[in-house]
């Protein structure tokens, strides 16, 4: 698959490292950098975990191969021992052989269906367990932007302690919120790696839910950024007359 048709976990982690360096340089005392470092650690494990989750279960595959081989051997034995003489009593043996063949077909088919469904359920359960981490960290990122209120730039006289005290300038607040939005986007891209290697309908739905969560949080962030930019915009000279 072309590098332009699939997500590259290493590139996503590299982007996260760059973002963590930017956050640390701009906001060295903020906890947001620690959240980004945690996301980097998750990203470093994601590619290996996703590949391991989608890897074939050789124990189940061997079970399938053994079952098929046993079924073929049983069919061969029936064909070898079946002796049909129409009009004699051996014809009843023919029907008994047909009945035995049908039973073997049912048993082999049930075993194959069971092995296949078990493999899918195991992979799905592992993927959903890993994807829960991305849902959790998306909420953590959202909590960090939650207290960044553009209204604090108005300088109102609310009593101290009534709400989180803001010390950021409009430029700093915009940059902080932008970092949160970038982290949310990269979180959804890491989650998408599971849908890329394991195209299971349930896994894809879970990834879509994480992407929708990240997009919803980003929309709130960009609404705040728009408010900050409108508050920081210079007042036209005509309006001051």
Image (spheres, rainbow, N blue to C red):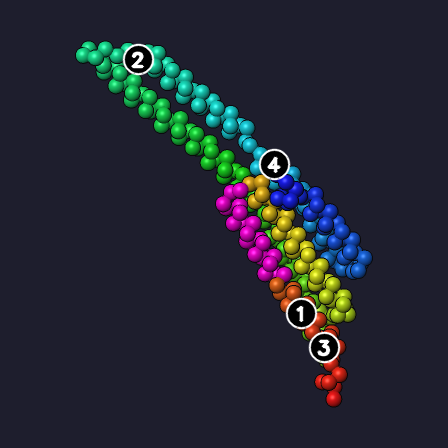
In the depicted view, which residue is nearer to us: 160 or 82?
Answer: 82
Q: Earlier in the sequence, mark 1 or mark 3?
A: 3
- Look at the numbered discs 2 and 1 and tell me whether their residues touch, using CB distance below 8 Å: no
Marks 1,4: beta carbons within 8 A: no
According to the picture, the residue beneath numbered tag 4 turns out to be 52
Mark 3 or 4 closer to N-term? 4
| Residue 204 image point, x, y percent | 53, 47
Instruction: Decide: is 80 above or below 9.
Output: above
- According to the picture, the residue beneath numbered tag 1 turns out to be 226
Looking at the image, tell me whether mark 3 or mark 2 is earlier in sequence order. 2
Determine which quarter of the picture holds residue 138.
bottom right
Q: Residue at (74%, 74%) from the top-left corner?
A: 232
Q: Quadrant of residue 71?
A: top left
From mark 2 to mark 4, how far is it between C-alphas? Answer: 47 Å
Mark 4 element type = helix
- The earlier-in-sequence mark between 1 and 4 is 4
Kindly report the distance in space between the C-alpha atoms of the residues bearing marks 3 and 2: 94 Å
């Amino acid at each position: 698959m072309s590098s332009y048709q699939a997500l590259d976990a290493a590139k996503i982690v590299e982007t996260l490292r760059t973002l963590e360096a930017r956050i640390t340089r701009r906001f060295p005392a903020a906890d947001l950098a620690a959240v980004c470092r945690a996301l980097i650690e998750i990203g470093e494990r994601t590619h290996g975990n996703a590949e391991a989750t989608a890897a074939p279960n050789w124990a189940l595959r061997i079970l399938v191969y053994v079952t098929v081989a046993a079924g073929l051997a049983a069919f061969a034995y029936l064909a070898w021992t079946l002796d049909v003489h129409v009009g004699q009593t051996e014809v009843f043996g023919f029907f008994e052989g047909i009945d035995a063949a049908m039973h073997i077909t049912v048993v082999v088919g049930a075993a194959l269906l069971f092995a296949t469904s078990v493999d899918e359920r195991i992979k799905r359960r592992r993927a959903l367990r890993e994807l829960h981490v991305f849902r959790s960290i998306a909420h953590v990122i959202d909590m960090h932007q939650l207290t960044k209120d553009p209204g604090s730039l108005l300088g109102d006289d609310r009593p101290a302690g009534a709400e989180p005290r803001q010390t950021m300038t409009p430029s700093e607040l915009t940059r902080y919120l932008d970092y949160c939005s970038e982290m949310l986007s990269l979180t959804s891209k890491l989650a998408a790696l599971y849908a890329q290697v394991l195209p299971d309908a349930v896994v894809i739905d879970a990834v879509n839910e994480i992407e929708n969560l990240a997009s919803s949080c980003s929309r709130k962030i960009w609404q705040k950024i728009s408010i900050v930019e409108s508050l920081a915009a210079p007042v036209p000279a005509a309006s001051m007359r």
